[in-house]
Image (tube, rainbow, N blue to C red):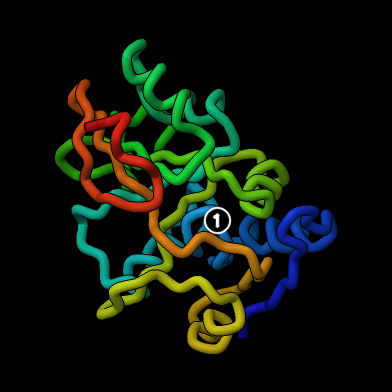
Amino acid sequence: MAKYFDVHPVNPQSRLIRQAVEIVREGGLIAYPTDSCYALGAALGNQAAKDRIVALRHLDDKHHFTLMCADFAQLGQFVHVDNAVFRAVKASTPGSYTFILPATKEVPRRLLHPKKKTVGVRIPDHPVAQALLAELGEPLLSSTLLLPGRDEPMTDGWQIKDELDHSLDAVIDSGECGEVPTTVVDLSEGYAEIARYGAGDPSPFE
């Protein structure tokens, strides 16, 4: 059964955040709120949790996993960012965007796109997600909580707890949560290509 954490949306309780992060560190898979719907989260090096995400979402090997980063400095450790890309990404973070970029050697090989050697990165604009990342001290391996056969991602903590109780180790419910997935911008070739239209305004990249 998944542990249920009722967390304040603006001032997350440190004690509860620490407990949730401990579950991640011990190999658990969590569902947590972001500014663009719920995400599944696990430790960066946790192969078993990655496999659980793949099974839960029925993903293929072309799926781009996302590294949820605390800030731009952390993001820069895991992807290569040239000057032109730097300005575009910096101006749009934190926010509801996921950027596809060439990965550095800090990213485990099994998380990379098999052909392009790229990975998704994102800096969320949500107090609970930011509190988790600050406590963890490294990016969260993440994927939108969009179940197979559904058109929309999950946005309600109690519903997630009810439906996925035996598939997750913890659900963090803060009430306030975005309802639309991120806009995904592929910058891996040095120019912007919108791979998915979502919550982030696409116009700066069109």
Is residue 10 visible to us here?
yes
Tag 1: residue type? Thr
Residue furthest to the top:
83
Q: Is residue 153 above or below residue 135?
A: below
Answer with left or right where residue 20 lies relative to residue 179.
Answer: right
Estimate the x, y position of residue 190 in percent, counting from the top left.
Answer: 21, 21
Near-viewer residue (134 or 127): 127
Q: Is residue 14 above or below residue 205?
A: below
Helix, strand or loop at label 1? It is strand
Residue 165 sits in which quadrant?
bottom right
Is residue 22 visible to us here?
no
Quarter of the rendering occupied by the C terminus: top left
Estimate the x, y position of residue 9 in percent, counting from the top left.
Answer: 71, 59
Q: Which residue is mark 1?
A: 34
Estimate the x, y position of residue 133 in percent, counting from the top left.
Answer: 64, 45
At x 83% / y 54%, what residue is drawn? 14
Answer with left or right where residue 156 lies relative to residue 8.
Answer: left
Q: Is residue 177 above or below residue 125?
A: below
Answer with left or right where residue 170 lies relative to residue 185.
Answer: right
